[in-house]
Amino acid sequence: MRELSLDRLRTLVAIADLGSFAAAARALNLAPPTVSLHVAELEARVGAPLLLRQRGQVRPSGVGETLLGRARRLLADVDEALDEVRGQVQGRTGRVRLGASTGAIAHLLPQALEQLGREHPGIDVQVAVLTSQETLARLAAGRLDIGLVALPQPAADGLRVQPWRRDPVMAFVPASWSTPARLTPAWLAARPLILNDAGTRLSRLSAEWFAKAGLRPAARIELNYNDAIKSLVAAGYGATLLPHEATAPPPDPRIRMLPLRPALWRPLGLAYRAGPLEQATQWVLEVLRGFRQS
């Protein structure tokens, strides 16, 4: 038997609820012959009468009652599915997949997600901790919707990357160390260092900063988890270079945060797929753009 038409099932439910073919035709805005045709097609499909006519009333047969029970559930599921899809199209609900580094997730994203929750409570943002390269690869493959990536990035077909914010890279050193007011590459290169691992953009930025002074210091340890790095600094294990967002809380009292000379900046960009975007993705981008910093 071929699949049953939802329109035919809706007609059957209307007849059962309203008690007549004529009332169902009026409620569904159909011609009476069309209503009769719908019932005839359903009965031909199941091979049995679905409605019984007795003393001017129309009642479902035993087979009709069974089909009506299923039809009501099917139609309710369809209505629920359509309402869910409409909510996603209108941006009232939806899921947005976002990739970002640990640094952005720790301080920038919580504030943005808090604002999003107030303005668009039906949008669910799923966050993955990724490097910029991993984020761009997943965006290109359709496995992410938005990425927070380090800049600059090479152009990629099908992706847009726009500048988002620029935060200063600061030196984080044990509070017990005696330091100048601003730390130079030469001063830091003479101390034990805890730096981001070589696969990150921050590692390359740091290496370029030292290289301009003719220095290539070796890190005592490399990590890709900023909070763990700060914990090691607080324990006196070494110094590090990390971005500092203006809204981030002050560091552990056992850590001193000092500016660099020359200054170093960590630029970030918003990456997303080119072309039309779902409304939920547009709302998330709009909130993130509110955290833009020049």
Image (cartoon, rainbow, N blue to C red):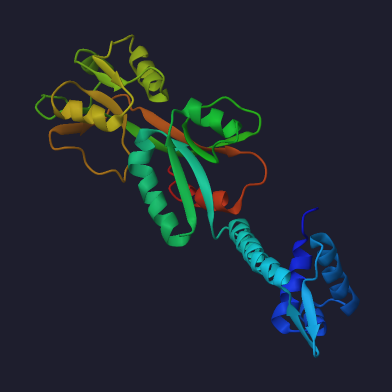
Q: Quadrant of residue 85?
A: bottom right
Q: Quadrant of the C terminus?
A: top left
Q: Residue 268: image x %, image y %?
A: 45, 35
| 132 relative to 216 in the view: left or right | right
Q: Is residue 12 in sight in this rendering?
A: yes
Rendered residue at 59%/56% (across/down): 88
Tell me which corner region of the image, top left, top right, bottom left or bottom right, holds residue 73. Answer: bottom right
Residue 140 location, x and y as percent?
60, 31
Question: Looking at the image, which residue is at 32% across and 9% down?
Answer: 216
- The residue lying furthest to the right in this view is 33
Q: Residue at the location (90% across, 76% down)?
A: 33
Q: Is residue 87 left or right of residue 111?
A: right
Q: Nearer the viewer, residue 61 or 71?
A: 61
In the rendered view, tell whether residue 213 sits above or below residue 35: above
Picture coordinates of residue 105, whole percent (x, y) = 37, 40
Position of residue 269 relative to residue 72, above or below, is above
In percent of the image, x 81 and y 78: which residue is there?
29
In the figure, 177 relative to 165: above or below? above
Counting every numbered tag in the picture gives 0
Does residue 27 appear to the left or right of 112 in the view shown? Answer: right
Give residue 37's quadrant in the image.
bottom right
- Judging depth in this view, the residue of 236 and 180 nearest the camera is 236
Quick check: 51 above or below 282? below
Along the line of sight, which residue is nearer the eye, 146 or 149? 146
From this viewpoint, is residue 173 visible?
A: no
* Residue 64 screen position, x and y as percent: 72, 70
Q: Out of 208 and 124, give the one closest to the viewer.
A: 124
